[in-house]
């Protein structure tokens, strides 16, 4: 099976500045489930020798990994698609109960011009589900606002020990190559 | 603990004046709807109900490692012409929000019986985050939520939920208040 | 390899965990929910223990994140069979990542002791060590007697990881030990012990 090409800077222009923000915050662990919306950012992180990128079988593993990273003195970032949010609501209790900083980047499906019906239930409930788990949600749907929003979210997460998710609109993440 | 005694025999018919245990009322609803598969994660509060399902010759009781498996099992049961129920604790709701997209998207019936922790006299702080968000998380993905906060209302509420699930084809969760279940009390 | 048809279980969980922790040195310990918390705390409620006291299925991955962050320290995850099964995919992730300083010890009593001793899938033949081995762990064993335990006591600290051991123990719970339930406290106590002045919020 041929690997899907990494989206170009033109297709996902916000990814490179976001990667720069992650570098600024000395993010050392990245946990992800493969996802077209984050594909360029994932590629940049995988190529970054300063970050250990971990491929998960399911998103709740990533939340637990971020807790362990912080316990060990490193900062991490957790990348997920909106569907994956529904796989880790219970594990987010660890973050809340221990007041562990969490920076999550969520790429949306089922939200903006979605053509695949199965994505709609979870996509429509993503923000409410995160908020049910006491995660602070910052939604962004302008490409030139993504990095700035991630910077604000990271500053909040790591300085105030809160869980903060940046939800990146499907308006920005559509690459045309996703099923 | 008086409550433990009351739990012991869910199937026995109550004698006049003696209170039936609320899990027996749920079991009656499951039987009335001819449910064939009951998937569960072990839980103290629902233990008498789980035991009754295991004993019942017409019900296949299926223990799970995590709650999202149960959503899949019951979707398959429905596709194969059987109905069922998922028995779980409130924390388990947070393990199956995404998988609930399957019955929601396919308009499959699903009945979930959820015993609450972390809301009434809870001593374990780790139970609070999820329980305080249980109803909101369910509603976030379009699940209909009914609550029962007294033992007498459990049977009636589950019966109402079962009709909505199996007759109206909806995904319905009944949250049984921790007040009904009783405090879990290890050593204090 | 795991012996499913192991001899009659003769290990006692509290004593087995105590034997392992006696050798911990500067190892960092993460526990799963339930009796594992009490087994570990019985050997001393020290700052280098993090009790994941309340959520099922996350202990192995907390251990992995910690092990990646601190490659200079051995990280030992001690959890129960029910908790390990709830996060079973973690074994695949850890096997792929080949984290050398991570060891997972599963106290297998084949039951959910916290909810009334209902059977877990290991009671019905699921072979956790076999799953770990097949997932790429460097070592994966299941032991059920004193000789087996002696090997685990050494190997959990010395074998290149990821290392996995199942201790088949008597089917019983553990005596309650006073353990701090407040996660904000145990998490920050852990980080202060580990990171000292470098601890950021």
Image: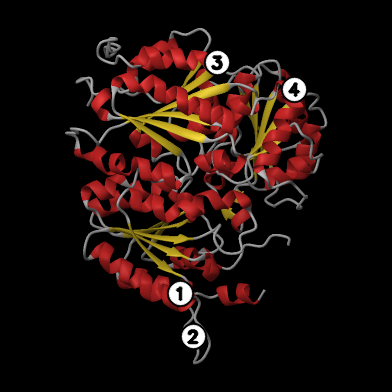
What residue is shown with label 4?
Answer: C197
Image point (73%, 18%), residue name? C158
Residue located 29% across and 20% down the image: A143
Q: Are marks 1 and 2 on the same chain?
A: yes
Q: Is residue A32 visible?
A: no
Task: Tell if the residue under mark 1 belongs to the same chain as the one under mark 3.
Answer: no
Q: Chain of mark 2?
A: B
Give the alpha-carbon distance from disc 3 to disc 2, as whole Å: 65 Å
Residue highlighted by disc 2: B14
How many marks overall? Answer: 4
Contact? badges 1 and 2 (CB < 8 Å): yes
User: Residue B135: horizontal and vertical position, in percent?
Assistant: 41, 56
Q: Which residue is mark 1?
A: B24
| The N terminus of chain C: image quadrant | top right
Task: Name the disc covering residue C74, or none.
Answer: none
Task: For label 3, count other residues whose C-alpha is less than 10 Å away and answer few (under 14), some (14-19) or many (20+).
Answer: some
- The quadrant where residue A74 appears: top right
For the point 22% across and 26% down, which residue is it? A179
Q: CA distance from mark 1 to mark 3?
A: 56 Å
């Amino acid at each position: 099976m041929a690997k899907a090409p990494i989206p170009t800077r033109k297709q996902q222009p916000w990814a490179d500045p976001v990667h720069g923000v992650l570098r600024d915050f000395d993010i050392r662990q990245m946990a992800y489930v493969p996802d077209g919306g984050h594909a360029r950012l994932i590629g940049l992180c995988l190529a970054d020798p300063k970050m250990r990128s971990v491929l998960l079988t399911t998103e709740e593993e990533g939340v637990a990994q971020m807790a362990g990273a912080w316990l060990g003195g490193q900062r991490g970032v957790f990348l997920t698609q909106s569907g994956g949010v529904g796989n880790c609501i219970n594990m987010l209790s660890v973050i809340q109960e221990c007041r562990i900083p969490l920076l999550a980047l969520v790429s949306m499906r089922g939200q903006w011009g979605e053509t695949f019906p199965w994505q709609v239930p979870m996509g429509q409930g993503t923000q409410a589900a995160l908020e049910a788990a006491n995660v602070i949600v910052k939604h962004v749907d302008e490409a030139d606002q993504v990095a700035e929003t991630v910077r604000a979210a990271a500053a909040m997460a790591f300085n105030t020990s809160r869980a903060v998710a940046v939800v990146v609109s499907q308006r920005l993440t559509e690459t045309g190559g996703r099923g | 603990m008086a409550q433990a005694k009351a739990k012991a025999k869910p199937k026995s018919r109550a004698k006049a004046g003696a209170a039936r245990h609320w899990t027996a009322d749920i079991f009656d609803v499951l039987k009335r709807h001819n449910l064939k598969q009951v998937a569960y994660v072990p839980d103290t509060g629902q233990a008498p109900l789980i035991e009754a399902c295991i004993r019942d010759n017409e019900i296949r009781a299926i223990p799970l490692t995590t709650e999202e498996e149960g959503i899949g099992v019951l979707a398959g049961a429905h596709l194969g012409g059987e109905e069922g129920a998922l028995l779980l604790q409130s924390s388990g709701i947070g393990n199956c929000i995404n998988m609930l997209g399957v019955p929601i998207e396919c308009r499959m019936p699903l009945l979930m019986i959820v015993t609450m922790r972390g809301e009434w006299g809870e001593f374990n702080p780790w139970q609070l985050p999820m329980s305080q968000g249980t109803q909101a998380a369910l509603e976030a993905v379009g699940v209909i939520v009914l609550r029962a906060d007294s033992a007498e209302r459990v049977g009636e509420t589950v019966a109402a939920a079962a009709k909505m699930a199996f007759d109206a084809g909806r995904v319905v969760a009944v949250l049984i208040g921790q007040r009904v279940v009783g405090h879990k009390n290890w050593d204090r | 390899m795991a012996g499913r048809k192991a001899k009659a279980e003769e290990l006692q969980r509290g004593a087995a965990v105590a034997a392992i922790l006696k050798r911990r040195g500067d190892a960092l310990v993460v526990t799963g929910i339930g009796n594992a918390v009490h087994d570990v705390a019985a050997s001393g409620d020290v700052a280098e223990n993090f009790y994941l006291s309340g959520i099922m299925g996350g202990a192995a991955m907390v251990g992995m994140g910690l092990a990646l962050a601190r490659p200079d320290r051995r990280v030992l995850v001690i959890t129960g069979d029910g908790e390990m099964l709830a996060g079973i995919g973690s074994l695949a992730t850890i096997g792929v990542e080949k984290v050398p300083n991570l060891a997972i010890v599963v106290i297998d009593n084949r039951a959910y002791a916290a909810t009334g001793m209902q059977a877990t899938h290991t009671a019905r033949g699921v072979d956790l060590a076999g799953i770990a081995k097949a997932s790429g762990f460097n070592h994966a064993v299941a032991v059920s007697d004193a000789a087996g335990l002696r090997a685990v006591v050494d190997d959990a600290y010395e074998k290149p990881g990821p290392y996995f051991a199942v201790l088949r123990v008597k089917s019983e719970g553990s005596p309650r030990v006073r353990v701090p339930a407040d996660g904000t406290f145990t998490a920050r106590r852990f980080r202060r012990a580990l990171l000292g002045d470098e601890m950021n919020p």
